[in-house]
Image (cartoon, rainbow, N blue to C red):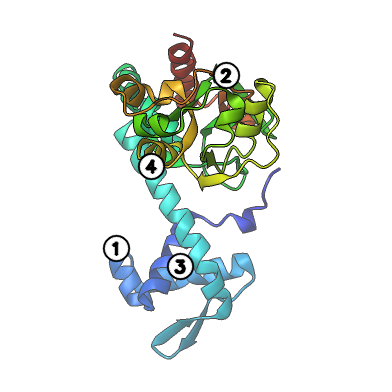
Amino acid sequence: MQVQRRFLPSTSLLSAFEASARLLSFTKAAQELSLTQSAISRKIKTLEAQLGVTLFSRDKQKIALTQAGESYLPDIRKALKLIAAASMTLRVNPDGGTLDLAILPTFGARWLAPQMAGFLAGNPGITINFTTRLKPFDFSMEQLDAAIHFGQPDWPGTGAAFLMNETVLPACSPAFLQKHRPKDAAALGRAPLIHLSSRPGAWAYWFRAHDTAIENITGMVFDQFETAAQAAKHGLGVALLPEFLMRRELANGELIPAINLPIQSPDAYYLVWPRRRANYPPLAAFRTWITSLAAA
């Protein structure tokens, strides 16, 4: 949809407004922008005429923002910063770009981050900015190009690329196992269990997979695998953990299977992106790389 020009003032007008609003002086704004005071005054009048709103009150040699100007300033300041950041990124990486990626914390720290040097070596012009998200969000409200998602490929308004399945197993500390020694799934249900808030049905699914009915599955709840694994390592209970994320602890014996009954999770890992960004070059490069890496 085409936006009317009156609602798209030039950056020179907006820069004059932002500087004048910040300094509360047309003269100081003129000095900052290397213009004359009269030029700044004309730009502000042009902007006010274009918007049909008075942005400044004038009292002799003093100016002040009107209520409309106060309301307008934050969004304009944010927009100018975004334009400046985009221009700087383009200047630094004219053949690359920036990929803003949401990651799951433990997946990002333990699986993705150690591999990133390979991507950056093959794509030296691309910069990746990471942010942590635990649950799906609205891409139209978040300035992100893609996200790592665990679940089903049903995120509204997105495209998705399958990355990998995961196998989870009940893990605990050696001391915990020595004390409880569960012989089957039913016995494990009577031991202290550690839950992940983002996967509230994980233990119920595990017990059903082993034909065991547990009426009340209780225990401690954590929001990340990292803290759940730490709790299990310190003997607080049994955590249902992805094997590929806990290889170090399983290899060195800090964590061991409470009972040797692993299962494949019903959900999987995906790279998802808003459909409008599907052909964005940094995303396309990252998608090709991560899907190949996960398949290997």
Q: Residues within 10 Å of mark 3 (few under 14, many from 20)?
A: many
Q: Secondary structure at mark 2?
A: strand
Q: Residue at x 69, y 22 (%)?
A: 211
- From the image, which quarter does the N terminus lie in? top right
Image depth: mark 1 or mark 2 in front: 2
Amino acid type assigned to the residue bearing label 3 in the image:
Phe
Of pointers 4 and 2, the one earlier in the residue sequence = 4
Place of residue 203 in the rendered image (x, y in percent of width and height, measured from the top left)? 60, 33
Amino acid type assigned to the residue bearing label 1 in the image:
Ser
Place of residue 43 in the rendered image (x, y in percent of width and height, measured from the top left)? 47, 67
Q: Is residue 64 above or below residue 253?
A: below
Q: Nearer the viewer, residue 250 or 236?
A: 236
The span from disc 3 to disc 1 (Cα, nearest Å) is 14 Å
The span from disc 3 to disc 2 (Cα, nearest Å) is 61 Å
Q: Residue at x 50, y 23 (%)?
A: 169
Q: Which residue is mark 1?
A: 34
Q: Which mark, by number, is residue 17?
A: 3
Q: Which mark, by number, is residue 87?
A: 4
Furthest-bottom residue in this view:
60
**Quadrant in the rendering for residue 235:** top left
- From the image, which quarter does the C terminus lie in? top left
Of pointers 1 and 2, the one earlier in the residue sequence = 1
Look at the numbered discs 4 and 1 and tell me whether their residues touch, using CB distance below 8 Å. Answer: no
